[in-house]
Image (cartoon, rainbow, N blue to C red):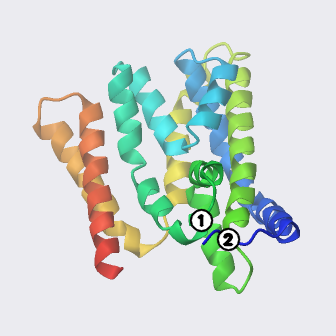
């Protein structure tokens, strides 16, 4: 059965999502600026950086893909490395079957595209506090996040063009700083420890022990961590 659409309730829920996500959006802006600096280092222009943010909208995936390009990896390998790091999004969007059930295709695609760690987690936290948080709350939060992310990355890229040499003023550390910020933001508690540890250990082992390009170590590590997370989720589901 398609969900009953109440325009007033949908608008109120959308606005609540926009409002409640604001503190998290400010954090996204910080590492969006850092990513923009990184993108500029490999020659990506501001409009293309913004377009990447709007179409990919996966911070850790974008950071890893651009970092791999900067390290000399090919385009296809860089994309695979980014995808492997974000396999957790498959599990997150799969958990939205109740919110997406019965909706038209465009709403399903929009909801899936706008789902991120921040608005997905906020939706469930709001529900736990007894608040109204469903599909339109998720979309409202995602709309704020994607706008802030694309805008911040574009600003960071444009700002980098005004600087003579990022390494000379210490901003070449922006890649590492942005990824540290992302990791801290993605950590949801002790339950994440096992998949993270397996992913890191697998990546390190493959990179050290096998004669392969480091991007493949990231891909294998991402797949291993996602497989463990999926198995644990199925066991508890």
For the C terminus, the quadrant is bottom left
Q: Is residue 53 above or below residue 195?
A: above
Q: Residue furthest right?
A: 8
Q: Is residue 184 above or below residue 127?
A: above
Residue in the picture at 70% in, 50% down = 145
What is the quadrant of residue 125 in the picture? bottom right
Rendered location of residue 76, percent (x, y): 35, 24
Mark 2 touching mark 1, by CB under 8 A?
A: yes
Q: Is residue 170 visible in this depiction of the protein?
A: no
For the N terminus, the quadrant is bottom right
Which residue is label 2 attached to? 3
Q: Is residue 218 above or below residue 89?
A: above
Of residues 161 and 152, which is closer to you in this image?
152
Rendered location of residue 100, percent (x, y): 58, 63
Precedes in sequence: disc 2 or disc 1 = 2
Left or right, 51 with respect to 42, comes to right
Q: Is residue 175 above or below residue 186?
A: above
Q: Secondary structure at mark 2?
A: loop
What is the quadrant of residue 210 in the picture? top left
Mark seen at residue 196 = none
Residue in the picture at 23% in, 45% down = 204
Q: Secondary structure at mark 1?
A: loop
Which residue is label 1 attached to? 102
Query: How many residues crowd around disc 1 within 10 Å: few (fewer than 14), some, or many (20 or more)?
Result: some
Rendered location of residue 235, percent (x, y): 28, 78
């Amino acid at each position: 059965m398609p969900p009953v659409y109440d325009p007033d309730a949908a608008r109120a829920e959308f606005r609540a999502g926009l409002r409640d996500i604001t503190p998290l959006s400010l954090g996204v802006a910080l590492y969006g600026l850092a990513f923009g600096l990184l993108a500029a280092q490999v020659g990506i222009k501001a409009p293309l950086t913004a377009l990447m943010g709007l179409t990919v909208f996966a911070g850790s995936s974008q950071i890893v893909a651009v970092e791999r390009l900067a390290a000399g990896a090919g385009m296809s390998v860089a994309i695979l490395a980014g995808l492997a790091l974000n396999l957790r999004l498959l599990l997150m969007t799969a958990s939205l079957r109740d919110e997406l059930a019965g909706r038209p295709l465009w709403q399903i695609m929009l909801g899936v595209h706008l789902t991120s760690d921040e608005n997905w987690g906020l939706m469930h936290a709001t529900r736990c506090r007894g608040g109204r948080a469903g599909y339109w709350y998720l979309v409202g939060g995602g709309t704020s996040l994607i706008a802030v992310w694309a805008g911040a990355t574009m600003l960071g890229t444009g700002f980098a063009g005004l600087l003579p040499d990022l390494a000379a003023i210490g901003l070449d550390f922006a890649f590492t700083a942005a990824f540290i910020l992302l990791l801290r933001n993605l950590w949801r508690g002790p339950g994440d420890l096992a998949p993270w540890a397996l992913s890191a250990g697998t990546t390190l082992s493959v990179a050290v022990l096998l004669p392969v390009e480091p991007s493949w170590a990231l891909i294998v590590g991402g797949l291993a961590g996602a497989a463990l997370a999926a198995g644990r989720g199925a066991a508890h589901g």
